[in-house]
Structures are given as C-alpha cells and as structure tokens.
Amino acid sequence: MGGCHPNDNNYQGRELRLQQQYFFVSCSLQDIIRNYLQHNDNFDNFPNKVAIQINDTHPTIGIAELMRLLLDEHQLGWEKAWDITQRTFGFTNHTLLSEALERWPLSLFGRLLPRHLEIIFEINQRFLDQVRAKYPGDNEKVARLSLIEEGAEKRVRMAHLGCVGSHAINGVAALHTQLLKNDLFRDFYELFPEKFSNKTNGVTPRRWILIANPKQALLITNKIGKGWIKNLEELKQLEAFVDDGEFREQWRQIKQENKQDLAEYILQTTGVHVDANSLFDIQVKRLHEYKRQLLNLLHVITLYNYIKQNPNADVVPRTVIFAGKAAPGYAMAKLIIQLINSVADVVNNDPDIGARLKVVFLANYNVALAQRIYPGADLSEQISTAGKEASGTSNMKFAMNGTLMIGTLDGANIEIRDRVGQENFFLFGLTTEQVSQIKAQGYHPWDYYNSNPQLKQAIDQIASGYFSKGDSNLFQPLVESLKNRDDYLLFADYQSYIECQQRVSHAYRDQDNWLKMSILNAARTGYFSSDRTIREYAQDIWHVQPVPITLEDDQQENAAINIEAQPAYSH
Ligand SMILES: *Cc1c(COP(=O)(O)O)cnc(C)c1O
C-alpha cells in the first residue's frame, strides 16, 4: 500500500487527503479478505497467507480498518482480531522530518471516521496499560508513546499507530534505521527492539540500466553475459576490465553518445546549447530545502564569479542541470526554481562566460525524463543535510549508469560510498553528529556569511537583484531564510562543498582515471538492485519463499527489451 504524493515529505492535514487514504485502504483490505475467504473458512491462517506492508504513514489507517472489518463485519473478538492485525502488518518509515509525519486533529478524524477513532482509543488504552506496567510512574514516557498527542489541539499520531499495530518496523537505509532507533522511534525501540530492522532501498536494473541505457547494457552483456540482468551483483565482473584500454574507450564512447542525446534534448526543450564535452553536473529530484538545490546554485554562482574575475581562467567547462517538481503550496520551492532559472538566464547569456558554464532547469521532471537524464550524467549531486534524506534512490540510479557522486554522509550515500570505494566518491560536509552538535550549541549563519567573502558575494548578488533585473524584492524571502535561520546548514557546508567541487574539476581533467572511477561505480552497485531489497522483505518480514515461474511464448516475445522472469513470491 502506498503511492504517489503531490506533497513529498510534507503533511498538510487536509480532509480530502484522509478520505482518499481511507477509501483506497478500505477497498484494498476488503478485496484481500474477499479473496482470502474464497480459500479459507476462518481467519486463523490470515497472517500466514496475507502480508501487508504499510509504505509510509499514509496507509496506517489500514490497521484500524482491518480491526473494524474483523470486529464488526466478521464478528471476531478483540484479542483474536488484534493478534491477526499485528501479525499481518509491517511498517516502513520513509522520513525523519517531523513536519512530514501525519498527525490528524481528533475533531476532523472523529467526524470522518468515528468508529476508527473508537478503535484507536481502545488500541491506545491497552497499549498504554502495557507501557505503565513496564515503566510505573513514568508519565512522560506514556505521553511520548501515546497514539494521541495532547495539547490545545489533540491529534492522532499515525506513525505511532503504525509502530504499535505492526510486527515489523523498518527504515530504508542503514543510517536512517539507526536514526529511527536512536531518535524518532527511540521509545518504541526500547519497548520492542525485535520489531526493528533495516531494508536498504534498491532500484530495478531492468528500467534503470536495460531500458534507460541500452548501449551500456549491451556493452556489459557483451563483456560478462546477461546474468547481471537478474543478478546485479554480477556487475562486479566488470572490475576485471577497468585496466582494459579498449573497454574503457567503449565505455567512454557510450557516455559521450548519451551526453549528446541529452544535449539534444536540452536544446529542443530549453533552446540552450550545451557542450557534450563539458562536465555534466546533475541534480534531479523533488524540490525541497533539505535536498539543498540552493547549495548547488551557490556553487554555480561562485564559479560564475570566479570566471568573471579571472577572464582567462582555465576552468573545466561545466553544464549544471537541474530538474524537479515543487509541491503546489510550497512557495519557497517554487522561488528556488525561479532563482535557478534567473541565474541560468544571466550565466548562459554572459559573453565573458562562453561555453565554460551553462545552467539549465528541465521542466516536468518524471520517470520518463529521469530515464533520459541518468545515462548522460558525469556527476550526481546528493547533497542533502546529513540526517535528513532517508535513503534516496537517484543516487543508486546514477551510480549504475557510471556517474560519480558528490555527496554528504546521508541516506544510502553512505552505503554506496562503502561499496564503490572512498577513492571513487567525492565526500564533503558535516556528519549527522556534527549537524546535531552545531544546532545544539546555537547555529549562527551570519558568522559564516560575514567571514566568507565568496559566500557573501553570492548572497548579496541574489539579494540585490543581480539575477532578477534589479528586482531586490523577488528573492528576499529566500535570502532572509538563509541569513536568519538556514535550517539546513547551507552556509555551514558551503566552503567544504566548494572545495570538493574543485577536487571534482581537477579529477575530471584526468579523463582516463575518471573513466576508471565511472566503471567502478557501475560495477560495484549490484547491492542496490531492488531484487535484493525485495528478497530481504520476503525473507525477514513476509516469510515467503520464491516460486519459479515460466513465461508463455508470447511473454518471451517481450524480450525485445530482454526483460526476464523474476521469481514471484508466495506462501
Ligand atoms: C528516482 C526518482 C526520484 C527520487 O530521487 P531522489 O534524488 O532519490 O530523491 C524522484 N523522481 C523521479 C522521477 C525519479 O526517477
């Protein structure tokens, strides 16, 4: 259960949203039960035959809905219904951002779903009785764990319902799961540590290599056979060819052709000419302040100023490519898009800059566009504030397509770096612990602004209207937010990021070594296949075994793109 959300990592508390969630969840559960009862005449075997994985907090209402169906529609007793419910559900958390966790006001919830509120109160009473028995007199712990948040406006904490109503709770990268245990769900982890596990995300190599990058796919198959399509760890065999000059040349040629295709798309959609020989430096993802597209843009402005001040500078030419959607009501995200486009306008049309720097924002980011972008990337920007990105998956898709990463120690970046090797990764920035420390001791973005002339110049240009035809009001909200709060520590990480980008440019001059790093990034990312992720859920949470399936002849025809049978799973 789960799906797509117009608001990524942001909770709005709109009534229609709860109605939609309930509608889809109830339909799914009633369909599951209908199907189950065609083969069973009681519910004893339900948790053995059905596994429901709650994908983020949005479908957690399913826990109360399954209880309602079992109690009211199928006349089970509470104890039996609760045992079945807990053994059926697993809960995957996808974010540590507290503003993204759904907390429905009791008034709204009770008006829409009065029976479910009753059931949640009953679940809570029984749960808190256990908590009180274990921690006598610790009322603060009871308040922290409760499914109901007290206060002027009482709320239902949907993430807590997910933790209490499931037998398994997981995060989506090693660091993220660690932070769930230590921070967000600390009290729950103390109560039932056995429920917690990590399931690092993965992506499907069929879409993200085979379909998106057919030339690279064919080269790989010619070298190591087609086993990698079903067992991505086989990409490791490519390591044997990293010192093979002919293979490197083939690898280079394919990246170059992919960059030319992307350059063609950029020309057609934006009218901007970009040089396919420049370093394609790419950040494509939902617009969010924690993902720090602005930090990337501060580097762009810094590079622009450097070239302006050093007209004959021999810099590595770069094409900086952005894409990503902003949620409809997220004004700051939209302003960031406007600033990217404004900076692009100035940079791309400055004759002093020429082909040394180009900036483009590609509209309407979606999976189809993503498939065009990753294969043509030299450098992938994964620069979130440490501790904020649960996992990320574009980091994986880029690496599989032979893209080097500039990144922080956040989400799955850490595990990618561990596998591709630190010498094949551009690391910068504060660690999660350092971020917490700085925040605890009182963070003053002004100090960084005042003590770093390049940073100050970039910010002052944005503020003065340098990129907005003299309009010094347009980007004020953005500038004020950075100078006064800078919640995501852009200023604190700025210098480290700029210096790391200099290391990137330096490394790109050695094309032969860059190619080796590119091959090793692709060769060592087999772990990040979604096949591995699904296998772990199947083994550890759903307790289901793989079942080999044979394809009909007409399905074999589908082999136009060589997509092969994956095992189905069943009890
Ligand atoms: C992979 C992907 C994402 C996720 O990107 P992150 O950088 O991991 O946040 C978002 N949108 C599309 C279209 C994608 O293909």
Image (spheres, rainbow, N blue to C red):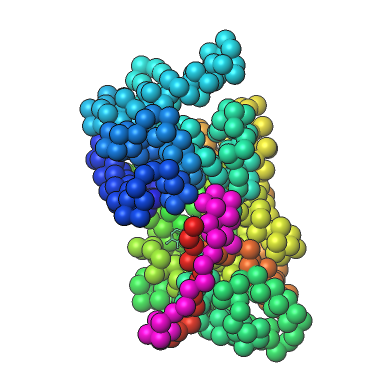
Tell me where residue 338 appears, x and y as whole percent.
37, 53
Residue 340 forms part of the magenta stretch: no
Q: Residue at x 54, y 20 (%)?
A: 131
**Could you say which is closer to the camera, residue 381 or residue 411?**
411
Q: Is residue 486 above or below residue 124?
A: below
Mostly what secondary structure, the magenta segment? helix
- Considering every residue shown, the one lying at the far front of the view is 41
Is residue 429 toward the left or the right of residue 391 in the image?
right
Q: Is residue 345 above or below residue 132?
A: below
**Apparent side of residue 22 relative to residue 324 in the rendered image (left or right):** left
Part of the protein shown in magenta = 532-557
Q: Quadrant of residue 64?
A: top left
- Tell me if residue 308 comes above or below residue 241 in the rendering: above
**In the drawing, does residue 44 fall left or right of residue 434?**
left
- Residue 13 in view, yes or no: no
Image location of residue 159, percent across then percent down: 45, 35
**Residue 138 on image: x %, y %:** 57, 13
Q: Nearer the viewer, residue 151 or 258?
A: 151
Residue at screen point 55% across, 60% down: 545
Q: What residue appears at the point 68 percent right and 58 percent down from the top-left corner?
A: 417
